[in-house]
Image (cartoon, rainbow, N blue to C red):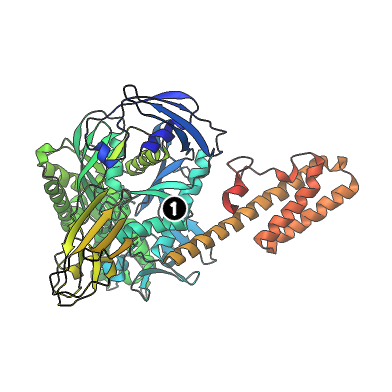
């Protein structure tokens, strides 16, 4: 990506940048780095903090080489943020002064709960405000939605029983989340989109700059559908998702950023809903993922569930009542369980007190009990065991031994559980490195990658791998096996092919199913799509030769091609994932959301115009000629009426009409924007949401 290196300095005016080449010989091949030693002279212009120049010119000379390049380069000066879209909490970071920095949300917090709720009156709440009211509105409060994204109902049967809202399936067996408050069933992508929207809105106000581009992280072990669904969520939120990167890889970027030494690290990432392990080699800005492994159904939620079940079964024993059937009680139990779990990370025992958890004819019932760290460990012993296999597998896939690992980096809130740290310690024989903030490091790393893509960081190369094997099969019969084409942990981008032939005499067509997973039998793996190669000349079985080629680009997008050697006939598909939303649906949601946002924004702006005008009339009313004042007042009344009952366009028209009357007065009048609705300054708010 030579041009990305070029983009960097075109932003900042005139100056000099020095590139140092890396010792890694494969950099050239990957094409994501400019392996040039020497100086780069550049000329560029930046018009203002928030304007986007369309092009600049770059000149490049190489100290000892003969190449000389001159030409316009695309200049990117819009901030690209890194987003950790977590099961429980999400975080945003951006490069500030060359350093990845967490962006605080509108509530001043560094992370935002990934929770969305609809109130009985249909209002939408996102983040802390949604989390806060979960107990009183459990059926309409959506948390841990990431566990459902890009999944079919049969893949999440267990998870769907653990949440307080109703998880249903649509006619295609895809997961939908039922929201009785507004009578709608949401795809998980739509709910995640609301979280993303809040994150970027808050980031826009924090950074004082409109944010439309992002790098979003996903668990390394997410399959193609889950990745695509995450990208769709970004699209619904109106975001341009420049890259999806793996969470442990992002963590390593943040850890290794500015670190010069060569290290082999193991990232152990246990969050709220997923578990990932990656082994990486970090040396002089090159981040090479050697292997990755994980479990997308293991996280802090499962530890909470163990405590919930323990509390519920004790209660059932004592009172004969099943609290798990009562949504509100379940929500309270879940919150209390998480609180107890967190307390047990610093204390050896904790009290759980849930007064009025339910009531019978005998009166109210309460839970009052003590949970010790030892009991908690016992309740979760199988979950702790499940952390071991991915660590061992990832090491084996990387062809390394524990002694080869220099650092074990703990990521994710659940790594604060002492028993989890103990597992890591015992397994690896190493004291885990706790220098990174487990809640923030993924977003920080995403911001580093965002910086690379925006052209603000030049000396980092990321070589990631595909987490799951990809293969094909021509039948999905129960006994047919998957023929692997790209094995798991292959460095991206990659291209691999295999030769296939016909199984019947005279066979003229073959259907290829594109599969992802590690299972032997085709039917046990995830089918990402299928395509048909037609027009094969009739021949005895085994004679035709069909080349099947799989390509995965740096974004992890797979294309598959089948070519009949005899005729050159070719069929191809680009797998964009068997997402649970159709493209049309995703676009419609995006449009709906945009309209809603525009409506809210216009109203806010109109309110502030009314306020400003009234204020000015009060202050300067005496000096304004009577008829002018009357006109202003009448337009003002009109605007107020439209705010109450008009359409977005009518409000805009009324605002414009009022402006017409106010502007000749020469003051700022109604044309100015109120800081409460326009944190971006004079020309930002309207343009933000109406274009
Ligand atoms: N001190 C603590 N002790 C134990 N668990 C904790 C502690 N702090 C946070 N957690 C747990 O960590 C989990 C959240 O971690 P984190 O924010 O890293 O996850 P996430 O990024 O939302 O999820 P994921 O990465 O799986 O998508 C929750 O289950 C939370 O209860
Ligand atoms: Mg996480």
Report whether 624 appears left or right of 303: right
Front position in the image: 637 or 456: 456
Q: Can you give x and y, in whole percent of width and height, for residue 445 in the image?
A: 34, 40
Which of the 4 image quarters holds residue 418? top left
Question: Which residue sits at x=56%, y=56%?
Answer: 597
Location of the N terminus by quadrant is top left
Q: Is residue 670 above or below residue 22?
A: below
Q: Can you give x and y, in whole percent of width and height, for residue 479 in the image?
A: 13, 73
Q: Residue furthest right?
A: 626
Q: How many marks?
A: 1
Secondary structure of the residue carrying numbered label 1: helix
Does label 1 point to a residue whose CB lies under 8 Å from ligand 1?
no
Front position in the image: 444 or 25: 25
Question: Which residue sits at x=57%, y=48%?
Answer: 688
Which of the 4 image quarters holds residue 600? bottom right
Q: Is residue 197 visible?
A: yes
Residue under label 1: 196
Report whether 276 appears left or right of 234: left
Q: Can you give x and y, in whole percent of width and height, for residue 430 in the image?
A: 14, 38
Q: Is residue 382 above or below residue 531?
A: above
Q: Is residue 303 visible?
A: no
Which of the 4 image quarters holds residue 405? top left
Report whether 653 appears left or right of 123: right
Front position in the image: 291 or 112: 291
Q: Residue furthest top?
A: 63
């Amino acid at each position: 990506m030579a041009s990305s290196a070029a983009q960097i300095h075109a932003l900042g005016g005139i100056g000099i940048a020095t590139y140092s080449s890396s010792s890694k010989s494969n950099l050239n091949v990957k094409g994501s780095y400019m392996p040039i030693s020497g100086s780069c002279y550049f000329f560029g212009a930046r018009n203002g903090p928030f304007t986007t120049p369309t092009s600049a010119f770059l000149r490049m000379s190489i100290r000892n080489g003969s190449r000389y390049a001159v030409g316009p380069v695309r200049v990117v000066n819009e901030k690209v943020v890194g987003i950790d879209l977590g099961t429980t909490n999400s975080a945003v970071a951006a490069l500030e002064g060359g350093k990845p920095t967490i962006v605080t949300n509108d509530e001043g917090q560094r992370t935002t709960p990934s929770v969305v709720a609809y109130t009985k009156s249909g209002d939408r709440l996102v983040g802390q405000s949604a989390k806060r009211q979960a107990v009183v509105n459990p059926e309409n409060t959506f948390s841990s939605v990431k566990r459902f994204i890009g999944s079919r109902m049969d893949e999440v049967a267990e998870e769907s029983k653990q949440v307080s809202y109703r998880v249903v399936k649509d006619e295609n067996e895809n997961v939908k989340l039922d929201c009785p408050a507004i009578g709608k069933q949401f795809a998980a992508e739509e709910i995640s989109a609301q979280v993303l929207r809040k994150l970027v809105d808050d980031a826009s106000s924090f950074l004082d700059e409109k944010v439309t581009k992002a790098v979003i992280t996903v668990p390394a072990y997410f399959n193609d559908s889950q990745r695509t669904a995450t990208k769709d969520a970004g699209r619904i939120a109106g975001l341009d998702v420049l890259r999806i990167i793996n969470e442990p890889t992002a963590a390593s970027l943040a850890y290794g950023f500015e670190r010069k030494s060569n290290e082999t690290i193991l990232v152990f990432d246990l969050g709220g809903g997923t578990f990932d392990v990656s082994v990486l080699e970090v040396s002089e800005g090159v981040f090479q993922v050697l292997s990755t492994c994980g479990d997308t159904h293991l996280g802090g939620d499962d530890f909470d569930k163990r405590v919930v079940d323990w509390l519920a079964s004790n209660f059932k024993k004592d009172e004969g009542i099943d609290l798990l059937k009562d949504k509100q009680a379940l929500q309270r139990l879940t919150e209390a369980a998480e609180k107890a779990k967190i307390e047990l990370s610093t204390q050896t025992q904790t009290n759980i007190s849930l007064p009025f958890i339910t009531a019978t004819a005998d009166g109210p019932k309460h839970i009052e009990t003590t949970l010790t760290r030892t009991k908690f460990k016992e309740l979760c012993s199988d979950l702790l065991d499940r952390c071991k296999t991915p660590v061992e597998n990832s090491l084996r896939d990387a062809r390394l031994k524990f002694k080869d690992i220099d650092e074990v980096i703990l990521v994710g809130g659940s790594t604060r559980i002492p028993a989890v740290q103990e597992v890591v310690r015992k397994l690896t024989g190493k004291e885990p490195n706790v220098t990174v903030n487990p809640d923030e490091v993924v977003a920080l790393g995403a911001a580093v990658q965002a910086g690379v893509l925006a052209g603000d960081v030049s000396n980092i190369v990321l070589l990631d791998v595909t987490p799951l094997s990809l293969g094909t099969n021509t039948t999905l019969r129960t006994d047919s096996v998957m023929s692997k084409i790209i094995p798991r942990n292959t460095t991206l981008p990659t291209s691999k092919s295999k030769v296939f032939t016909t199984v019947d005499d005279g066979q003229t067509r073959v259907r290829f199913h594109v599969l992802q997973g590690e299972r032997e039998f085709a039917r046990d793996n995830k089918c990402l799509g299928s395509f048909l190669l037609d027009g094969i000349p009739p021949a005895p079985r085994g004679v035709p030769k069909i080349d099947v080629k799989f390509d995965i680009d740096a974004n992890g997008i797979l294309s598959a091609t089948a070519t009949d050697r005899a005729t050159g006939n070719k069929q191809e598909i680009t797998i964009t994932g068997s997402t649970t939303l159709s493209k049309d649906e995703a676009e419609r949601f995006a449009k709906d959301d945009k309209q809603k946002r525009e409506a809210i924004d216009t109203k806010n702006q109109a309110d502030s115009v009314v306020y400003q005008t009234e204020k000015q009339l009060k202050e300067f009313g005496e000096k304004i000629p009577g008829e002018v004042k009357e006109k202003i007042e009448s337009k003002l009344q009109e605007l107020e009426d439209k705010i109450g009952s008009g359409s977005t366009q009518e409000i805009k028209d009324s605002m414009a009409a009022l402006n017409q009357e106010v502007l000749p007065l020469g003051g700022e009048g109604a044309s100015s924007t109120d800081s409460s609705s326009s944190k971006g300054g004079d020309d930002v708010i309207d343009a933000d949401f109406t274009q």
